Amino acid sequence: WWTHEDRDDGTSRFERVEESSECHLNDVFRQALDATWRHARAGAAGAAELFVEFRRLLGCGVHALRCVPMDGEVARRLPPELRGDERISAVRLPSAGASGGGQLAGSLLQRAKTTVVELL
């Protein structure tokens, strides 16, 4: 999970959210995915339903949040409001399958970083 800020000079700034916030966002997003599973193949309408449910469950605005999922199925359902740089896409990644084991990019990157730091 990242926050996105458009600057006056035309550039953008992305910053990773804190680990505790990321865990909470992951949990809430998973709940929203589960609650809207019936709309999973509904394209833009399904993405809109997911976005509404995510905002409802989170209980606050999400205008600056961006997500890079590490699961192809989640990436296909991701509402445009939560997408970051359009050049970065996880749509071609495989689905996590019925086990629901898909993780979001930030979580995987944090685990990789922690492992590298421990090795050093």
Image: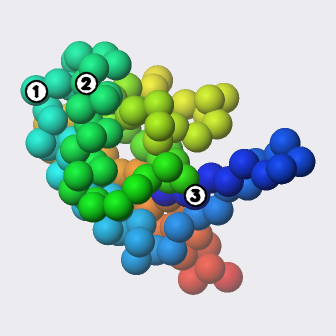
Q: How crowded is mark 2: few (under 14 residues within 10 Å), some or many (20 or more)?
A: some
Q: What element carries label 2?
A: helix
Judge from the rendering whether residue 114 lies leftward or rightward of residue 76; answer left or right. right
Kindly check if marks 1 and 2 are in contact, taking CB atoms under 8 A apart as contact.
Answer: no
Residue 73 or residue 67, whichever sits in front: 67
**Label of residue 46 in the image:** 2
Q: Distance between the residues labelled 1 and 2?
A: 8 Å
Relative to residue 41, is residue 47 drawn left or right? right
x, y percent for residue 30? 23, 51
Callout 3 secondary element: strand
Q: From what the image shows, is residue 23 above or below residue 99? A: below
Q: Which residue is disc 3 drawn over?
A: 3
Count how many numbered circles sit on residues in the image. Answer: 3
Mark 1 / mark 3, whichever is N-terminal:
3
Mark 1 — residue?
Answer: 38
> Type of residue at label 1?
Arg
Label 1 or label 2, whichever comes before in sequence order: 1
Could you tell me which secondary element the residue under label 1 belongs to? helix
- Is disc 1 surrounded by few (<14), some (14 to 19) or many (20+) residues within 10 Å? few
| Residue 56 visible in the current orientation | yes
Q: Marks 1/3: CA distance? A: 29 Å
